Image: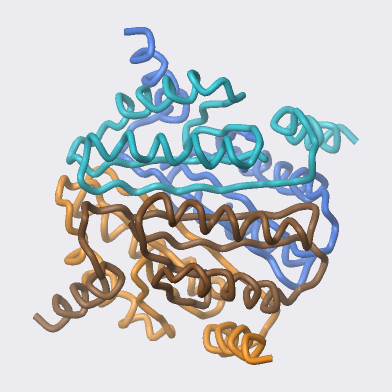
Chain colours: A blue, B orange, C brown, D cyan
Amino acid sequence: MIAEFSIVPITGEESLSKYVAILIKEVESSGLKYQLTPMGTIIEGETDRVFELIKKCHNLMKQHANRVLTRISIDDRGNELNRMDKKVKSVLEKLDE
Amino acid sequence: MIAEFSIVPITGEESLSKYVAILIKEVESSGLKYQLTPMGTIIEGETDRVFELIKKCHNLMKQHANRVLTRISIDDRGNELNRMDKKVKSVLEKLDE
Amino acid sequence: MIAEFSIVPITGEESLSKYVAILIKEVESSGLKYQLTPMGTIIEGETDRVFELIKKCHNLMKQHANRVLTRISIDDRGNELNRMDKKVKSVLEKLDE
Amino acid sequence: MIAEFSIVPITGEESLSKYVAILIKEVESSGLKYQLTPMGTIIEGETDRVFELIKKCHNLMKQHANRVLTRISIDDRGNELNRMDKKVKSVLEKLDE
C-alpha cells in the first residue's frame, strides 16, 4: 500500500521542520521507500510495516508534546509494486495524449 | 487517543452503507468506545488497540474490493479518559459563556 | 454536499476548545445544518455555501495565529437532501438486518 | 497558503489516473504553482484562488460521477512565498546537521 502521513506535535513552535527531520530519520531506518512532500511523507510497503512505522512515528512525537495530531491517507491497490512512481507516471502519460 | 477513520472500497457501488455496517460490527466487537458520524467512525482507546482495529477494518474491506482508500485523523492528548465526550462538552460550555 | 472540517491554529495552547467555540458561532450564523463531533464539524449545504463558510472559518482562525492547519473531507452525492441524517440511518438499518 | 487535495469520483473504475489528468489540466490553466504527488496534488497561492481552484476541480469531477469524495489539507503560514520548496528544503537542512 501507499500511505501519506503528517504528524503535528502541539508544542507552540510555529516551525515544525525539526520534528519532520526526526520522523524522516525514523522512516529512513525502516527501509521503506518514501517521498517527502511539502505536505507530508509518503511511504510504500506491506500493510503491517506501514501501520507499524506510522505508529512508531506518532509515538516518537508524543515524546516531544503532550498533544499530537496525526493525519493518514492510504491508497491500497492489490499487490502492485512501485506504485508511488507508477501513479504519477500514469497521470503524466495521459496528459501527453 | 481519539481517532476518526473512513474506509472506501472502490467497488463501483455508489452506496457504501453496507460496507460501513460491516465495519461497525468489527468496531463493536473490539469493545472500544465509538461514535458513528455522517463522515466516518470515531473510536477511542489505547494507541496499540486503535491502530490494530483500524488496520483490521482496512484489511476487511480489502476482501470486498481490490482498491481501498482509507483516511485516518488522530488526536492524541496525554492520558485523559472519556475525551470523546469531554471535547464536545468543553466547546458547548464555551458557547454558553 | 456534506463536508467535515477541522481547523487548528498553532498558538502554543494545548486546548483548542475556545477556538472551536468561535468557529461554531460562525457556523451557526451561516444557517447551514451542522453537527459538532469530537473530531471536527460536519456541515451540509450547497457547494458554494459550504466552500464559502469553510474559507470564512479558516480566515477567522488566521486572526488568532500566524500558522493555521485546516483539514476538509467532502462527500458530495447528487442532489439528495438531509444526507447527514440519512447516512447514519442507512448504516443502522443494515446493522439490524 | 499551501493546500493538498485529492478528488475521487465514484465511477466503479479502479484506475483514477485519467480523472487526475483532467484535474491537472485545470490546475495548470489556473497558473498556480503545483506539484503532483502519488497521493494528491499540492498547490500554492492566495487563499481565495486556492479555494476557487479546488471548488472548480471538485465540480469538474461531478460531471463524471454522481458521488465525489474530496479530501483537502491546508497549511497556511503568514505571507511567505515559495513555501512549497522551502518546507522540504528546511527539513533536508536539518537532516544534514
Q: Quadrant of the N terminus of chain A?
A: top left
Q: Quadrant of residue A96?
A: top left
> Residue C9 at what x, y percent from top left?
72, 61
Q: Is residue C37 left or right of residue D22?
A: right
Picture residue at 21% right of the left edge, 73% below the top: C91
Image position of A63 with respect to A19: above or below: below
> Residue A74 at what x, y percent from top left?
43, 48
Picture residue at 22% right of the left edge, 35% below the top: D64
Picture residue at 69% right of the left edge, 57% below the top: A8
Viewer-closest of B13 and D31: D31
> Residue B13 at what x, y percent from top left?
14, 51
Q: Residue furthest left?
A: C97
Image position of C11 with respect to C66: above or below: below
Q: Is residue C16 left or right of residue A52?
A: right
Picture residue at 50% right of the left edge, 79% below the top: B44
Q: Is residue B56 left or right of residue A63?
A: left
Viewer-closest of B85 and A54: B85
Q: Quadrant of the C terminus of chain A?
A: top left
Q: Is residue D64 left or right of residue A60?
A: left
Q: Quadrant of residue D14?
A: top left
Q: Quadrant of residue A78?
A: top left
Image position of B94 with respect to B14: above or below: below
> Residue D85 at what x, y percent from top left?
73, 27
